[in-house]
Image (cartoon, helix red, strand yellow):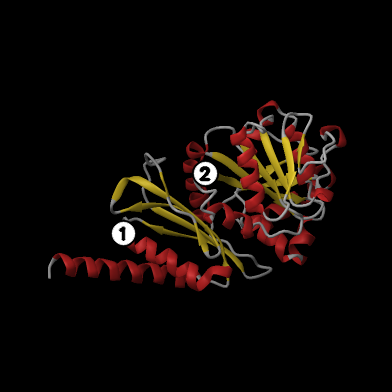
Amino acid sequence: MIPVSILTGFLGSGKTTMLGHLLRRAEFSRTAVIINEFGEIGLDHELLEASEDSVIALATGCLCCKVRSDLTQTLEDLLQRLDEGTASFDRIVIETSGLADPAPILQTLMTDIGLIDRLALGGVVTTVDAVAGADTLEREWVSQKQVAVADRIVLTKLDLAQAMEASLRRRLAALNTGAPVLRADHGRIDPRALLGTDDHDRQIAPEAYAWGAQATEKQLHDRHGAVKTYAVVRAEPIQAVALTLFLETLAEHCGPDLLRLKGIVNLVESPDRPAVIHGVQHVLHAPIWLDRWPSADRRSRIVFIVRHIPQGWIEALLDAIDAEVADVTSRAAFP
């Protein structure tokens, strides 16, 4: 499986500068970069090698290409080049436009039949400009969305606005309490902390668990809007059918307002192998089964980043479905 990381962030937040530094690192020499529009690449001119093709070879050994018709076609073209031996890469980074909602990209990676057997979602990284970030979050809904769906948030331009860091971190935590906030120094950052260099499946367990743990400690809300972050925690195992019905109901009735869902779940049918779940709006990814629990704590933790969905309603829905499934199971066992 080839990990696909999404790099997003509002206009001028420094994502392209950071990407340029990453691509100079040896561990990123086999990376394919997909960008929305060539006009936004801005990758230092010395990195680019002239080409009339849609795929450009970078001086670092990486590849860079633009979305021609749609993202699916672009990814399929890259995979075909890999199979034919005309391209060589072991990771993909998608850099979005500064005004783009990353949710459709996540949905493509979660649902496209031709891609899900070969590509694994490696996480969402969102850059936030320390100078203009607070004002941008106040004014631009898409900026809030970019932060809300992030697995990691990177603060940039701190050399120009260190005094703003504490208040900006509080604002970011209100939108997404589970994502670690990292600091970039003039675009430079430890790539292992940002995108990871180990196998995707080994990384997803501790990340998902940490996300749930942090959100459980603080159930925060966005004072400036309707975005809320909270965690649903269950000590008792959940039946697989109940979890499926619960997620399907959320997707059907809450899709547009379910910004991100992520968690680790203890299922009755698989007590020793937890399921990692995640979704974006009306699209839910198939569970990833872990070989073991990452700690002694076996509670189910599902983190929600939502808009206009009360936590009480979510809790009541899960309780009602779980109770109904238990009742049907009991009657089937003792007719």
Count of all numbered marks drawn on residues in the image: 2
User: Which residue position is annotated with label 2?
Assistant: 207
> For numbered disc 1, what is the local secondary structure?
loop
Q: Earlier in the sequence, mark 1 or mark 2?
A: 2
Q: Quadrant of residue 26?
A: top right
Res 264 visible = yes
The residue carrying pointer 2 sits among few (fewer than 14), some (14 to 19) or many (20 or more) residues within 10 Å by Cα, namely some
Q: Residue at x 86, y 32 (%)?
A: 46
The image shows residue 196 at horizontal and vertical percentages of 59, 36
Task: Tell me the CA gap for discs 1 and 2.
Answer: 24 Å
Crowd around label 1: few <14 · some 14–19 · many ≥20 (10 Å) = some
Q: Position of residue 220 (x, y in %)?
A: 57, 61
**Residue 17 at x, y percent in the picture:** 80, 41
Query: Picture coordinates of residue 252 (x, y %)?
Result: 48, 71
On screen, 190 above or below 270? above
**Residue in the image at 37% along x and 39% along y:** 291
Hey, what amino acid is under mark 1?
Answer: Gln
Outermost residue toward the right in this view: 45
| Closer-to-camera residue (197/322) | 197
Corner quadrant of residue 43: top right
The residue wearing badge 1 is: 239
Comparing 200 with 205, the one in front is: 200
Residue, far left: 335
Q: Nearer the viewer, mark 1 or mark 2?
A: 1
Question: What amino acid is found at the position of numbered circle 2 in the picture?
Answer: Glu
In the figure, is residue 43 to the left or right of 240? Answer: right
Say which of 112 and 294 sits in front.
112
Asked if residue 23 lies left or right of residue 236, the reply is: right
- Is 124 rendered above or below residue 250? above
126 to 48, vertically: above or below: below
Answer yes or no: do the residues labelled 1 and 2 have beta carbons within 8 Å? no
Whether residue 177 is visible: no
